[in-house]
Image: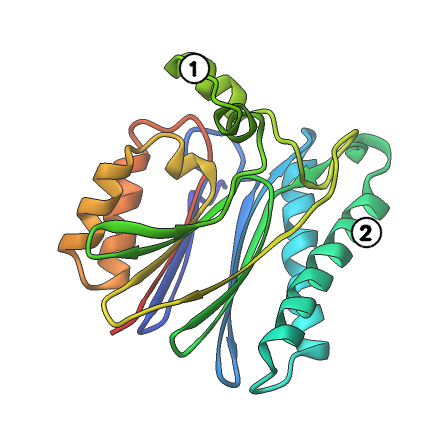
Amino acid sequence: MRMDSRWLCYPHLCGVTHVGARDNNEDGFIAEKLPDGYLVAVADGMGGHAAGEVASAIALETVIETFKREYECGMEGKLLRLLLRKSHELANSNVLLEAVGDRKGMGTTLTTAVVRGGEVFLANTGDSRAQLIRRGKIVAMTRDHNLLRELLDRGFVLSKREAMEASRRLTHVIGGRGKRFAVDLYRWEAKPGDWLLMSTDGLHDYVEPEKILKILEEEEDPRKATEELLEEALPVTWDNVTIILYRWF
């Protein structure tokens, strides 16, 4: 029996992954309590023959294992950024190691965050996305690793169809046949009332930013806001949908 969605919610935090318009869900997420915060991540697998969901699961499990083994309460920011980078590097190695037979070429995006107080430390590989949202405006966002972002940076003007096609061509991933690996690191400072939104492209490629921002400006509860974002995505998306919301009260 197909499970359409999986939810996990805490007082400040809610996450969901939904099969959306696909037959199987290659997305995944984690939301783990740390001694002094939360470890959260989203991943969007690719590869066919169920390999995509294997790749995303391997990447997320690698992040959990790396932090269980090496994270220390109050870890200094520089060391934490190194640990985030290491978790993505190990995820890349582990996915490549398992990419044999029908799973050859499998890969996944991976966006990982540690939330401690008003600080957010992030690592990103691929085109899943994290955004810091304040009073209905995006004040910080990870950079998508896809052809669309590269073309826009070079000044190209694209039609909506061209933009959608370019957004599907990833430039950096975890694993993946013929793809490069890279990880971007970020540190953001949040204020009370801010949202951290992490999502796979099943949400942010199909739901207009204005709709997302309006929901987060009008809603305060992470569970209700997550439900509303998912309700916006499901009628229009052609993909799996994964959302994590964290709110600073």
Q: Which residue lies at the image location 39% right of the left edge and 12% below the top edge?
A: 159
Question: Horizontal placement of 198 versus 180: left or right?
Answer: left
- Residue 49 sits above or below residue 184 on the image: above
Question: Horizontal placement of 198 versus 139: left or right?
Answer: right
The foreground one among 198 and 192 is 192
- Residue 231 sits above or below residue 29 on the image: above
> What is the CA distance from the residue labelled 2 to the residue labelled 1?
35 Å
Q: Quadrant of residue 85?
A: bottom right
| x then y, percent, for residue 40 | 50, 63
Q: For the residue carrying disc 2, how many other residues have a C-alpha within 10 Å: few (<14), some (14-19), or many (20+)?
A: some
Q: Which residue lies at the image location 20% right of the left edge and 51% below the top edge?
A: 136
Whichever of callouts 2 and 1 sits on the residue coming sooner in the sequence is: 2
Q: For the residue carrying disc 1, how many other residues have a C-alpha within 10 Å: few (<14), some (14-19), or many (20+)?
A: few
User: Could you say whether the residue bearing mark 2 is in a helix, strand or loop?
Assistant: helix
Name the disc covering residue 93, or none.
2
User: Could you say whether the residue bearing mark 1 is in a helix, strand or loop?
Assistant: loop
How many labels sit on residues? 2
| x then y, percent, for residue 219 | 16, 57
| x then y, percent, for residue 175 | 75, 41
As drawn, the residue found furthest toward the left would be 218
Q: Which residue lies at the image location 54% right of the left edge and 35% below the top edge?
A: 24
Q: Amino acid at mark 1?
A: Leu
Q: Which residue lies at the image location 48% right of the left edge and 29% below the top edge?
A: 22
In this figure, which residue is indicated by the disc labeled 1?
158
Q: Nearer the viewer, mark 2 or mark 1?
A: 1
| x then y, percent, for residue 204 | 38, 37
The C terminus, quarter of image: bottom left
